[in-house]
Image: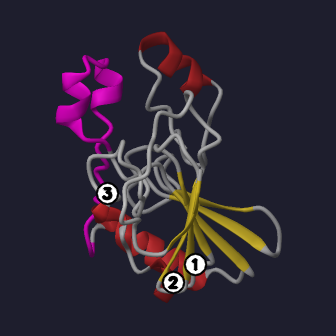
Amino acid sequence: FGPNHRTGSAFSAHIANFHPPGWDTPDNLDGNNGRYYSVRLSDNVEIFCLNPGWNTSMAEQQNLDEQYVETLEPGGIVPDSRQWLWCKQALQASTATWKIVFFHYPPYTSSSSNRMPGYYAMRWPFKEWGASAVLSGHIHAYERLTVDGLLYMIGGWSGAVSNSQFSTPYSIGSQVRY
């Protein structure tokens, strides 16, 4: 769900081994541009990858390299931005049975290691657009939530050993945490 713990040569090595659709045309803001895109895995499953951007000031505080600091999404993450409109249109046009959206920051979480209760900017109307589930990372713990009838899962299987602890009251819709 993103190389946010990799900098310098480790970041370059990650990018060298990962070529999302359209990576060669990053200036295309209309989707399949290497930053947000969809991949049809079968007649039944389509994956929609979004780029929630990165908090540049936080990256600078951590002395991360320029390549990493400059990952804010030029297609936008706010309502009616290019990425928002692309996602809405792509989900609504998809004929897949399972439409899985994924991106790095969780829109909802009970983790106290995150300074905010989820990445509010990515609380898009995915269910209204036809999504079946939303997967995210960033938090090094597992959490499953159902918000407004849509499944959200934080993949705690990635990254360093978890030092995440869950805050009470738990986030809206939280079902399982570990």
- Which type of secondary structure does the marked residue at label 1 adopt? loop
The span from disc 3 to disc 2 (Cα, nearest Å) is 21 Å
Horizontal side of residue 100 vs 160, given as left or right: right
Amino acid type, callout 2: Lys
Amino acid type, callout 1: Ala
Pick the residue in front: 70 or 156.
Answer: 156
Per the rendered image, the range of residues in magenta is 54-80
- Which type of secondary structure does the marked residue at label 3 adopt? loop
Residue at (47, 88) in percent of width and height: 128
Are circles 1 and 2 on residues that touch, CB within 8 Å? yes
The span from disc 3 to disc 1 (Cα, nearest Å) is 20 Å
Are circles 3 and 2 on residues that touch, CB within 8 Å? no
Does residue 119 lie above or below 96 as drawn?
Answer: above
Residue at (47, 57) in percent of width and height: 50
* Quadrant of the image occupied by residue 85: bottom left
| Quadrant location of the N terminus in the rendered image | top right
Does the magenta segment cover residue 68?
A: yes
Pick the residue in front: 135 or 169.
Answer: 169
Instruction: Look at mark 3 in the image and give the residue it sits on.
Output: 75
Pick the residue in front: 92 or 158.
Answer: 158
Q: Which mark is residue 131?
A: 1
Residue at (47, 60) in percent of width and height: 31
Residue at (46, 71) in percent of width and height: 87
Does the magenta segment cover residue 76?
A: yes
Is residue 153 something one can see in this rendering? no
Marks 3, 1: nearer the viewer? 1
Residue 157: x %, y % from top left: 65, 41
Instruction: Look at mark 2 in the image and give the residue it sits on.
Output: 127
